[in-house]
Structures are given as C-alpha cells and as structure tokens.
Image (cartoon, helix red, strand yellow):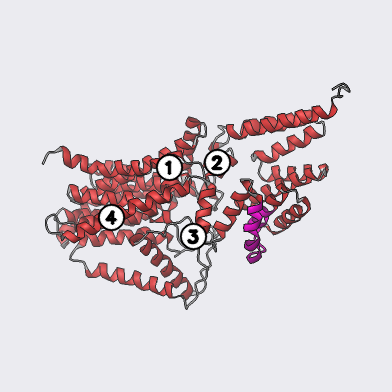
Amino acid sequence: MNVRFPRLLLLFPSWLAFVLYLPALSHGLVWDDLYFLTDQPYLRDPGLWWGQLRQPLFVSGNYFRPLPLLTFVAEARLGVMNPFVFHLVNVLLHALNTGLVVALARRLGCGAMAACGAGLLFALHPALVESVCWVSDRFDLLMAVFLFAALWTGDRIRHGAVRGLAVGSLFFLALLSKETAIILLALLPLFQMAAWRASGQPLRTMDLRLWLRRAWPAWVGLLPALLVYLILRESALAGLYQADAQMVAGNVLQHLLLVGKTLGLYLSLLVWPFGRISPVHPAPTPVMPGDVAAWLGLAATVLLTLMLIWQRRRPVPVLLGLMGLVALAPVSNLVPLTIGDNLVQDRYLLLPVAFAALALASLWQPGRMPRRWGVAWMSWCVACAFSVALAIPHWAGNLTLWRWAYAQAPESHVAQENLLGVLANAGLDEEALAVGAPMLARRPEQPALMHNMALAEMRLGRLAAAESRVRAVLSRLSGDSPKVRMDRSEAWNLLGYILMGEQRRDEAERALRESVTLSPYLSRPHFNLALLYFQQGRDVEAEREMAFVRRYDTPQMAAVHEARLRELRATLAARITPRDPQK
C-alpha cells in the first residue's frame, strides 16, 4: 500500500468534519451568543474585558470559564463582530478534535482504517451539532481539545518532568475552559492503562509496577495545575461552589431515579440520535417513583456497567467504556445541574461520543469482522451525515432555532421563553401574542413570558396593558444573581420606553436610570435616555448618553441608533420650523 494512503485516510475525518459544517459559517449569533457578544460590551471593550474574564458567567455563579471568553475577545477585535469569524473557529476546533480522536485511536494501536472509523463516528455524530453551530458552546470544544491532547501526551514524552509539565499545563487550560475538565484525574490513568494493554503488555503485578513507574509523573503534573486553578476559582467566585441548581432532586429514591433517567437518555441519544437532537430536552423534576423511563435508564446503566465488568477479557474497550461513563458522571445530575428544565443537553455528549468511538475502533479486527458489521457501520455514518446536514440550518438564526425547538418540545420552558422573545424582537407582534397567550395561561407567574408579551403589546400600541405586565415582572424578579440583575435591567428599560410613549417623562427617566444602575453597560437604556433628553431639549445630556452608546454598542447597532436619532432630530426640527404659507 502506498504510504500516502494511510496518511490521507487519517486526515479524511477532520477534512469531512470541516466540510460538513461549512454551512454554519453563514449563520448568525443565537441564544447566549447575543449576551456575550452583542448585548453587553464586556468582551468587546478593551477597558472591560479583563475584569469580565475574572468573573463568573451570568448563567450561574459556578461557571468560571475565562479561556473561551478570551478567545471571544480576540475574535471580536479581529472580525469586528462578524459572526463568520466565531463560527469558523468553532468549526476548526471540531475538525481539530476529530483529528485528536484519530490520534488517540492510533495511540491505542488501531490500524489506519479503524482509526479513520473512530474519527468518522466522532465527526458525524448528530449530538455534536449544538457544540459546533452554537458559538457559546466554545467551552466544551476547547475543553475537549485540551483533554484529548493531555491524554495523548500522557505517556508520549520520555522525560518524566517534561511530561508532567505538559500534562499539567493542558489540564490547567482545560479547567479554565470548563470546570468539568476535573474528570481528567480519572480519565488519564484509565487511558494510560488502555494504551499499555493495547501495546500487548499484560497487567500482572510485576508489569503493573513497571506501568506505574512510567505513568506516575503525568499524574503528579495534575496536582499543581489543580491547586492553581482552585485558587483562581476561589478568588473569582468568592467560593468554590454555590447551590444554584434548577433541578429538584427530591428524596433519595427520586434522586437515584433522576440520575438513572438522565444517564438513560444520554445513552439512548448516543446510540440512536436520529430525529431526537434538539437544544431542549425538558423533563419535570423531582422524578416520580412511577416513572418507567427513569427505571429503564437506571437498569440500562447498571446493565452496561455489569457488561463492561463481564468483558474484562477485552480490557481496552472496557477501559474506554468506563471512560465514557466517567465523562457522563458530571452531567448525570449526581449534583443537580443549572440547565433550566432540560434534563440533558446534546453538547454534553461530546466526550462520551469520542470514547465510544475509540472503544468501537479498538474492537476492529481487520479481516475478521463480518461484512454485515461493515455495512451497518457505513449505513450508520451515512444516516448521521444526513441528520447533521438537516440539523445545521436550524441554527442559522434565533427564529429558525426556536421555532424548531418549540415544535419538538412545546412543553419546554426554555423553548417557550426564547420563541416568544424572538417573535417579539423580530417585530412579529401579533404572532407573539397568539403564541404567548396559551403559554402564559399554563404558566401565569413566569416573568420571561410576561416580559415578552409586554414587548409585543407595547409595539402594537397597547401601552397600558404592556405597563401592567412589566410592573408584574418587576414584582416577581427577586435575588441578586447576574442573570436576575440583567432581567430586572431589561424590564426597567422596557418600562421606561413605555412611559416615554405615554408622555410620562419624569417616570420614564427614573425607570431608565434604574435600568442603567442594574446593568451599567447595557446600551439600550442609555439610548432611550438620549431620545428622552432630545425630546425635552436637554441636548448636552442627550449627547453624553449617545457618546456612551457609540462607545459600547456594536458597530451594527450603533448605525441603527444613529439613524433613529437622525429621524428624531428631523421630526423635532420640522415641528419648530415655521412653514412657508406659499408652500
């Protein structure tokens, strides 16, 4: 065989991963992307981004992920907020992760064909669409890069101290990308043991000692990296962990069933993702004792664990299967998660998909595999490619994303709130009210639904009804988390704009000032204050607010705001300019 063919074969999965996701390069920003990159200027303004890197994310007080945010800072300065740049980096990271999966397969002794198969399974799995197409999931993509690189490096460098430094550095970068990288403490020895066994070495006592002598320097490198990370995390979050879970565990049995149902859903998505991938997978909690799916998931997890133990004669795939279960542990709701009403998330399968692909590749025996297995593998890959190609367009924009999500799971709180907000922001006010009315009837106390209904009503000129809804929203938002402060700021801004429409200018100014106090760098209340001041003839104060808007807005929104300001000035000038009676 020409030596170039195996090399090209090993590069093929990465190339296919890149080509398959090329349509994503034309997509816009969706979901949390808007907060990170457009609504707030923290990652765009040189005077603000360093402080933001040292803060928890707005979603949860437990999310400390400065490295992906730093990549957003670099891309924002490079691409002037062009979504193409952010999507290109995500697609390249996916291609890189695919190449690392191939490299790990080769490290396990897999031939070129088997390693290529592992890469294809990873590149084409539909559950990874969310990670690649959603810019804000840079966290998982970057974490995977550093974890895969750490596993590959774990026994490749001969000098022990250099190996420990390399693995520790990669571990530190993975932790700065996402806190669940802590699982490398368990993954690394399992992978080293699998690589040792794949090389033909038995794990008898004397050989185990030899393996430990070679493997331990990499483990030592993990400890100082973890210590430095914990110090940084403590400094940024004022504590290592705070209870802010939105999942309700219930009693001991219900918590066990919650874990079982979560793992069961992940395992089923891993094996059969077709037609089931979605940004939302809602489920009520606590899980009731009569929930059949929860019991089945728990039984499937126990059965899988017993099968791995029973197959100890094949230690490599068994160890890789255990790595997949370890990768699921942090997202299995052992500690209830902060992910709204979603029991599982597609993006959390990124690492389990990789280890499942490696386990299957390690079972590949050239010339001894039945032809039907090859046909099944090819059919599965083709089905995955079609599924990915069909799913990618749904992530093109917020409207397509949330119409799709709501159609799949209309009971999802996340899908309801986002769809209603997108419809209102897109100016589809009548549709927003029609869609929102039954949602609000089922959940009359939900602030996000009420806020978006108020926005639609305000745009339709129903100012009194909109004001009543916004005041109800403000009465229901409590707490001092970054997310709650942002929500209250948005509500005060909307209230201020409604009051401007009702010509209650003093009240409007107080509401807008409250919005600015809660979220100082949100540009919308500053712009509304500028409009209010221009209407009152307070030009100096208006220009001061517009100077703030020009600095902290995105270039696109700054142009929109300038155009609206010119229209207001022209309207005001027309009102005070005497008309020529001859015209």
SS at mark 1 in the image: helix
Q: Main secondary structure of the magenta part?
A: helix
Mark with earlier residue (4, 1) = 1
Disc nearer the start of the sequence (2/1): 1
Circle number at residue 24: 1
In this orientation, which residue lies closer to the viewer: 78 or 561? 561
| Residue extent of the magenta highlight | 430-453
User: Residue 304's x, y, as percent?
Assistant: 30, 68
Q: What residue type is labelled 1?
A: Ala
- Name the residue: 10% across, 41% down: 1
Q: Residue 357 carries which label?
A: 4
Amino acid on which the number 4 mark rests in the picture: Ala
Res 408 label: 3
Please identify the quarter of the rendering in which residue 353 is found.
bottom left
Quarter of the view holding residue 572: top right
**Is residue 443 shown left or right of residue 342?**
right
Look at the picture and state if 542 lies above or below 447.
Answer: above
Task: Report the front residue among 187 and 73.
Answer: 73
The residue drawn where x is 66% and y is 55% is 433
- Total marks placed: 4
Which class describes the residues within 10 Å of circle 3: few (<14), some (14-19), or many (20+)? Answer: some
Mark 4, residues whose alpha carbon is within 10 Å: few (<14), some, or many (≥20)?
many
- CA gap between label 2 and label 4 equals 37 Å
C-alpha separation, residue under disc 2 versus residue under disc 1: 28 Å
Q: Is residue 240 visible?
A: no
Give the secondary structure at mark 4.
helix
Dots 3, 4 in contact, CB < 8 A: no
Give the percent coordinates (x, y) of residue 42.
57, 38
